[in-house]
Image: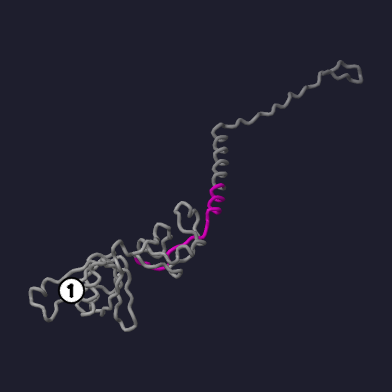
Amino acid sequence: MSLATRNGTPSVDAPVNPPTVVRQRRVRPGLLGLAVLLIALGGLGAAFAVTSVRATGSYLAVARPVEVGREISAADLVTVQVAGGQGLRPVPAARLDEVVGKRAAVALLPGTLLTLGQVTDDPLLGPGQQQIALGLKTAQVPARELHPGDKVLLVSTPDNDADADAAAAGTRFAATVIDMVSPANDDKVLYLALLTRDVPAVVALAAQERLAVVLTEAA
């Protein structure tokens, strides 16, 4: 580029500034991959949080111990909030009425979630069995409390008029505990499932107060 002067002196070439070159920043492939990964993880975390919130629900849990075979009452259960309870398959709180009145198929422990597999409609009486009730003194019971499902043996005690050999060969009857209650007078009423063929003999021995109860297997 030439410039002319006023006094006729030769033109002088003016200096030309070199063009400015903008240097482009190089993006490292590793950083780009890390950014994509962080975005993906953030999306997964948000999705998990939303899913967890949606999975939270009200379910039934055991509030106090319930023995095997005992009828379940509303007081035995409590409602709890659980996230992700579908995988555990607990009983929803809305189904409380379906559970109350059923029997515990297993021993229910406080603080555990209740499942349908832990309750049953099946009666404690098996095929060919009948239920009897025995009124007993505390000293006649082999444990402070007998529980539904316990196996007991009813043994006939000696008759005062029987000879020694007959007294030694006491008759035995296998039975299963259905329930036991303690009236106000501290006596015990023991409800048992007994084979139908043994019922007449056991009733007769009970009337004579000639029965001893032996615990053979705890539920």
> Does residue 25 appear to the left or right of 155 in the view shown?
right
Q: Was residue 49 drawn as part of the magenta stretch in this picture?
A: yes
Q: Residue furthest bottom?
A: 185
The residue nearer to you, when weighing 210 against 4, is 210
Q: Quadrant of the C terminus?
A: bottom left
- Give the answer, above or below, for where 1 lies relative to 168: above
Which residue bears the numbered disc 1?
Answer: 156
Left/right placement of residue 114 relative to residue 180 reads right
Q: Quadrant of residue 116?
A: bottom left
Quarter of the rendering occupied by the N terminus: top right
Question: Which color mode does the image show?
Answer: one colour
x then y, percent, for residue 67: 35, 66
Task: State the count of labels.
Answer: 1
Quarter of the image holding residue 124? Answer: bottom left
Secondary structure found at label 1: strand
Task: Determine the residue positioned at 30% across, 61% down.
Answer: 127
Q: Which residues are magenta?
A: 47-67
Q: Amino acid at mark 1?
A: Ser
Residue 112 percent across, percent down from the top left: 41, 61
Q: In front here: 58 or 168? A: 168
Q: Is residue 45 left or right of residue 181?
A: right
| Residue ranking furthest to the top | 10
> Percent from the top left, x then y, of residue 103?
39, 64
Q: Can you give x and y, in whole percent of width and height, for residue 115 in the image?
A: 43, 58
Q: Residues within 10 Å of mark 1 (few under 14, many from 20)?
A: many
Residue 28 is inside the magenta segment: no
* Residue 160, above or below 77: below
Residue 96 versus residue 7 in the image, above or below:
below
Res. 123 image quadrant: bottom left
* Farthest left residue in view: 164
Is 173 in front, or is 53? 173
Residue drawn at (51%, 60%) of the image: 58
